[in-house]
Image (spheres, grey):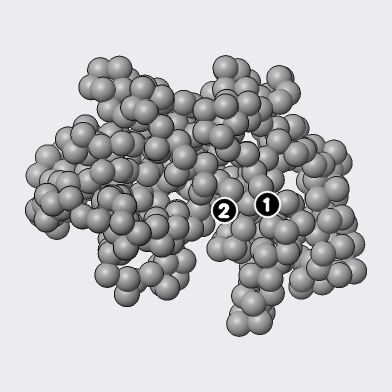
Amino acid sequence: MDKNKTSYSHFFPKHSFHPCFYSYIWTNQNGGIMKHVIIAGGAGFIGSHLCEYLLHKGDRVICLDNFRTGHPKNVSALTNHPYFKLVEHDITMPYMIKGIDEIYNLACPASPIHYQDSPIETTKTSVIGTLNLLELARENHCRFLQASTSEVYGDPEVHPQPESYWGHVNPNGIRSCYDVGKRCAESLCMDYHRRYGVAVKIIRIFNTYGPRMACDDGRVVSNFILQALQGKDLTIYGNGMQTRSFQYVDDLIQGMERIMSTPDSFTGPVNLGNPEEHTILEFAERILELTGSRSRMVFRPLPADDPKRRNPDITLARQALDWHPRISLREGLQQTIAYYRNLLAESPSQNISRP
């Protein structure tokens, strides 16, 4: 079909409809109610961990992914699970199914190197994709979690950032496709909640790391670890005094489950991140220590619109979800370094991308 040709038939492809076989109330192996869950972006870094967690809990999981930044290998260990289904699908096209209890929308490139390479597609995913999934949630009368981001705060002038802070965002810079796209997604979620009563849950995810981060995503954790393990210079952008707050992926997954279990009236947004702040320079030194690497640190110009400081206020998460990060930076990094060591043993020439 000509992609430029106006047509409405392709909005409802036959392969995207799945008749309801979930009309019964199922119980899982733990005696709880088995939920039927869609995870959009489920083959990505965070999504794959969520798929694994929910299957272990006893839920049925449909993993949607277009494999633009996610990869089937991230969920390869799950493909033979009787309650797991992997579907190659781009959420900018509607996906039709009945009998769903929860939808987690994690579908969107999250690395600057990826979303700056595909800015239009990134905006479409955040806006049209979110709209399609909200329609699916409305039709199924199910709960909907929107994975938003700390990037909605832009280059913040308030520290730490509470959810009430409206941010300091460049609306047309090179990061805007992601920052503003996620803001629009939040707006759509709240409009669907107000107009249709959809039980939406919005989380703002701060820097998250752990196994299955893509080697070529250009983010500081994967870059530093791979450079250190390969004996290459650690590339620091700017003077290294800009700060980030790093949370381990398992902590994030716990927070996501907790907000999904809140009453329908509770929408968020809620910051999910680690309030412990580190400079990039400190972080580089920690990586060198834990890897035992003798790599040098080299400094390069700071990319455009890169925030100088990012630190979450998690008061609301503590109060409403009884949640806070439990895994220390040292423990999380040790597990992540072990993952990359194994990866390099299998394929020594892993690429590292630059912003």
Q: Quadrant of residue 303?
A: top right
Q: Quadrant of residue 243?
A: top right
Residue density around tag 2, few if under 14, some if 14–19, many if 20 or more, within 10 Å: many
Residue 261: image x %, image y %? 40, 37
- In the rendered structure, the answer to whether residue 107 lies left or right of residue 335 reads left
Residue 113: image x %, image y %? 58, 49
Residue 317: image x %, image y %? 57, 31
Tag 2, which secondary structure?
Answer: helix
* 128 to 159, vertically: above or below: below
**Sequence-wise first label, 1 or 2:** 2
Disc 1 residue type (three-letter): Ile
Compare residues 56 and 336 and report the one nearer the observer. Answer: 56
Residue ranking furthest to the front? 31
How many angstroms separate mark 1 from mark 2 (CA)? 8 Å
Disc 2 residue type (three-letter): Asp
Residue 214: image x %, image y %? 57, 61
The numbered disc on residue 327 is 1
Q: Is residue 44 visible?
A: no
The numbered disc on residue 165 is none
Residue density around tag 1, few if under 14, some if 14–19, many if 20 or more, within 10 Å: some
Tag 1, which secondary structure?
Answer: loop
Tags 1 and 2 touching, CB below 8 Å: yes
Query: Which residue is depicted at the point 41% across and 32% down?
Result: 262
Compare residues 323 and 145 and report the one nearer the observer. Answer: 323
Query: Which residue is depicted at the point 22% across and 39% down?
Result: 136
Mark 2 highlights which residue?
A: 250
Query: Which residue is depicted at the point 82% across and 72% down?
Result: 231
Q: Is residue 324 visible?
A: yes
Residue ranking furthest to the bottom? 346
Query: Which residue is depicted at the point 71% across and 36% down?
Result: 275
